[in-house]
Each structure stands twice: as C-alpha cells, then as structure tokens.
Amino acid sequence: MTGDYLTNPQAYDQLMARMTVDSYGNQALFDSIQRLQPKSICEIGCGTGVISQGMVSLAERVMITDVDNVFLDYTQRKIGTDKAEYRIFDATQDTLDEQVDLIVGRFVYHHISDDDKQRTLANLRRNITRQGAIVLLDYFLPHYDDESQKASSVERFHRYRFSLFEGYPELLMLEQQTYELADDGEHKVCLRILVDQLAAANLHLSEDMLIRPDSIDDPDLFGMHLLVLKPAGIASDQFNSHNKNSSYNRIRS
Ligand SMILES: C[S@@+](CC[C@H](N)C(=O)[O-])C[C@H]1O[C@@H](n2cnc3c(N)ncnc32)[C@H](O)[C@@H]1O
C-alpha cells in the first residue's frame, strides 16, 4: 500500500505525542542502532519524522525516505536539509544508489500487504551491505501456539491497539483498515510468519526483543517487537545492555 493511510500529518503527530507507550520502543530502537554503530542509515516509511530527528546524529550519512511525498516533504521541513538526504523510496521494490549499513523502519511493516512482504524483505536485504542490518519496530499479534488460540490473539490485539486511538475516529478507521485482521489477515502482523519468510529473503533474525512497558499489566496483551535482521550467515551480536527505564526482553537470538 502507499501512504494513503495518513491523510493528515498534523493529526498523526498529535496522536503520536499521546502514545507514551511507543516511547519504550523508540528507546530500544535507538539503543539498538547505537550498538550496531552504522556509518550509513536509511529510514524507510518516515511518516512525520517521529524517529527521524533522533537518527540524524547516529550516523555520518542518513537517508530519510517514504513512499509518500506529502509525508516526506513534511519531515524534510521539520528536520531540515543540512542533516539528512530525503528520497522517495518504495520499500517493496526501489533500489538505493548505494548499499547502506542499516535500514530502519518503525511501524512500516504492517503497511506492507501480505503479497508484498516476501519481496520487500528480499529487496531490503539487497539494499544493505554484507555486514549490514535491518531493524524493524512494530506491533505483532500476541503469540499463539495453535489455530484454536488464534481468534483470541487477534481479539486481544484489536482491543489493545484500537483503544489507543480513542478520540481520533479518522485515524481509528484507517488503522482498522490497515490491519485487516478480521479473518485470515493475521499474516499482516504475525511474527511466526515473518520468521518463516526470512530464509527465502536470505536474512536471519539476529535479535527479537519484546518491548513490555511496566504500565501494561496483561503480558499477553502487548506485542511490540524490535527485530534485528541480518544477512544469512552473519553471526548474532552479543546483546548485553538493558535500558533501566523499560523492560525489554530478548526472546530470541
Ligand atoms: C504508520 S506510518 C509510520 C510512520 C513513522 N515511521 C512512525 O513511526 O511514526 C507508516 C508509513 O509507512 C509508509 N509506507 C507505506 N507503504 C510503504 C512502502 N511500500 N514503502 C515505504 N514506505 C511505506 C507510509 O507512507 C507511512 O508514512
């Protein structure tokens, strides 16, 4: 899909400012980027630049991209041109002029249609260096072991995600359309399915952190994951730092 999800950058920014829960994910994301020490970063699906500002100091070269020029222009005006380059980039198919050390995408994966996911992962792989990485932060369905638990996983996901959009009917409607989880749409945000797709994209899951803020009582309800993907055959990094203000659990490496 294209950027039509967001019709109003100002409304999106207001909503994001209210989403304090997301700040735990952002902290984990920035910690992860610092550990990887990339020289060049490409952010995909920058939207209104919620994390773009924080990235410009983390690498010598930062490219900020989106498939949608309205949001790219908005972010460029917000951050300025002296610190980053701005490009239209469709993650499903576009190619950068040169490979980068790190591709970062926050809340972009769930916008990619199921049919395009495999191709997108393979395409992102082609746009990073051999020692490079792809870091994705997104909400995924609560884990379920078998099909009988799937409906309740989807229901819990809906209940939590959509409660965050109270007071923003336009964005709530667009969020519901984007997730399309009613029937078999769980592929949209199913971590198990993403993991299955990685091998075909010549990638492996190097880190998987479940971000679980202390404010969330129900451990099954929350499913924000930070994923570090690396080219197949590259060893996982040692992960030994934890942010004291949030609890994120390293659940696979
Ligand atoms: C929910 S917003 C997230 C924006 C921002 N990353 C953030 O965390 O606030 C999703 C963004 O992904 C972009 N997007 C959707 N499909 C895309 C694609 N195929 N390639 C690149 N960006 C895409 C949209 O235009 C939108 O800006």
Image (cartoon, rainbow, N blue to C red):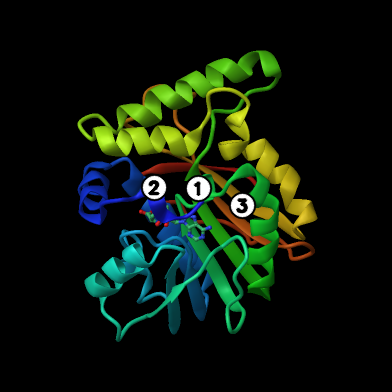
The front one of 94 and 19 is 94
| Disc ID at residue 34 | none
- Image quadrant of ligand 1? bottom left
Note whether 192 is above or below 157 in the view shown.
below
Horizontal side, residue 129 vs residue 66: left or right: right
Circle 2 residue: 5
Q: Secondary structure at mark 3?
A: strand
The answer to which image quadrant residue 73 occupies is bottom left
Residue occupying the far top of the picture: 148
Callout 2: CB less than 8 Å from ligand 1: yes
Residue drawn at the location 48% of the way across and 64% of the way down: 44
- Kind of residue at disc 1: His
Structural distance between the alpha carbons of marks 1 and 3: 22 Å
Location of mark 3 (residue): 207
Which of the two discs, 3 and 2, labels the residue nearer the N terminus?
2
- Say which of marks 3 and 2 sits in front: 2
How packed mark 1 is, by other alpha carbons closer than 10 Å (few <14, some 14-19, many 20 or more), is some
Residue 111: which disc? 1
Determine the CA span between mark 1 and mark 2: 9 Å
Q: Position of residue 136 (x, y in %)?
A: 53, 54
Q: Position of residue 140 (x, y in %)?
A: 53, 37
Q: Are marks 3 and 2 in contact (CB under 8 Å)?
A: no
- Upstream in the sequence, badge 1 or badge 2? 2
Circles 1 and 2: CB atoms closer than 8 Å: yes
Q: Is the CB–ligand 1 distance for label 1 below 8 Å?
A: yes
Front: mark 1 or 3: 1
